[in-house]
Amino acid sequence: MLRLIAASVAVATTLGAAQAQENIKIGALYNVTGGMSSLDGPSLKGAQLAVKQLNADGGLLGKQIELIAPDGKTDQQETAKAAQRVLSEGVVAGIGQSDTTFVMAGAPLFQEEGVPFVTSGATHPELPQWVGDYMFMTPFGDDDQSYAIADYAYDDLGARKVAVWTDNSMDFTKALSKFFVERFEEKGGEIIGTDSFMMGDTDFSAQIARLASMDPQPDAVFISAIPSEAGLSVKQIREQGITMPIVSGDGFDTELVSTVPGPELANDVYFSTHTYRADDRPEVTKFIEDYKGEYGIEPENAFAPLGYDAIMLVADAIRRADSAEPAAIKDALAETRGFKGVTGEISYTRETMVPPKPVSIISVQGGKFEVEEIWKPEMN
């Protein structure tokens, strides 16, 4: 009898292992704790929603999808370990990360193993060149979003003299400032002061004192930051009675810009981000309904649909390739044209492999977010 039970357990274990092998495994690299969590958390939730919907519709190639998502903890070493872990578990593709620095901690490992990696939110336009032909981007590039907010600052806010603050610890933030300065000066604007800080800084009093003492005063301050510093910088600037417009990129697309300063101080903030808010396309309407149905809240920011789009890009490639082999998925991804994502249409038509997507300009007044305009990129 004992031998019979043991044999039955062995058979059940073997069947369980076989079923597990039947799943199509996708790695999801996100920082759900630490300074990137307000972007990565919603992005992972969007990815999980996509997987749930795909599996409910029968999965891919007749198999269920399994999402493996260890926490990178907003730490580059932990992110590298997470990448090694998911690769060791046989993933056919990876998605994730809302920041370039963390993509660079994990994506090169995917390249080495010949497994495609699709970033859901990292925006440095040179990422595909840095990593290689297995690297793909769901979002636009920092050049596009920086140009968009520079155009808005100059054309709509009437800014002619701007101060620039940069988080010097991040590839993303340094690129954002570089492209902003490039575009603003090209339009005839002047950068009359620069300052810097590092990820994790919580006291901006020195930078604020230097900003307040500038003569002449700038028409606006551009702050290139990730979410944890975005809300704090707005709060501390406004607490010192400085009312000039604050402009930035998608690192400001976080509820922290409203909740940390509070509605009385969260005013005259403008940032560029992924086209999603106040968009009446059917893909957007359905995603908001589905997300609210799954999580009981509306999507926190544009990074939630970006996570969703990243999974759906991979799924679309698997279907078109009719294969879950990493090399076949990579080839199909490279041929993506006219993919209708929640955050806009995605086509890899540029030599850079950065999709030319529209950019939303968002204003924050009284703690409320509103779309001001949609900026269209050059398509080449």
Image (cartoon, helix red, strand yellow):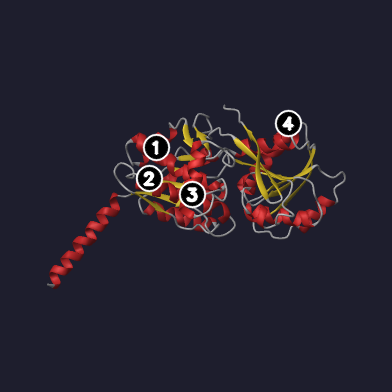
Question: Any mark on residue 186, and which?
Answer: 4
> Residue beneath label 1, please?
317
- Identified by mark 4, the residue type is Glu
Left or right of residue 240, residue 257 in this image: left
How far apart are labels 4 and 3 at the CA level?
41 Å
Residue at image position (16%, 65%) is 7
* Image quadrant in which the N terminus is located: bottom left
The earlier-in-sequence mark between 4 and 3 is 4
Tag in front: 1 or 2: 2
Q: Secondary structure at mark 3?
A: helix
Q: Nearer the viewer, residue 280 or 216?
A: 280
Q: Is residue 337 visible?
A: yes
User: Is 294 rendered above or below residue 280?
Assistant: below
- Identified by mark 2, the residue type is Leu
> Residue beneath label 2, please?
54
The earlier-in-sequence mark between 4 and 2 is 2
Q: Nearer the viewer, residue 103 or 96?
A: 96
How far apart are labels 2 and 3 at the CA level?
14 Å
Q: Secondary structure at mark 1?
A: helix
Q: Quadrant of residue 150?
A: top right
Tag in front: 3 or 1: 3
Q: Position of residue 317 (x, y in %)?
A: 39, 37
How far apart are labels 4 and 2 at the CA level?
46 Å
Tag in front: 1 or 4: 1
> Residue beneath label 3, please?
291
- At label 4, counting other C-alpha atoms closer than 10 Å, the crowd grade (few under 14, some 14-19, many 20 or more) is few
Residue at image position (66%, 56%) is 259
How far apart are labels 3 and 1 at the CA level?
23 Å
- Identified by mark 1, the residue type is Ala
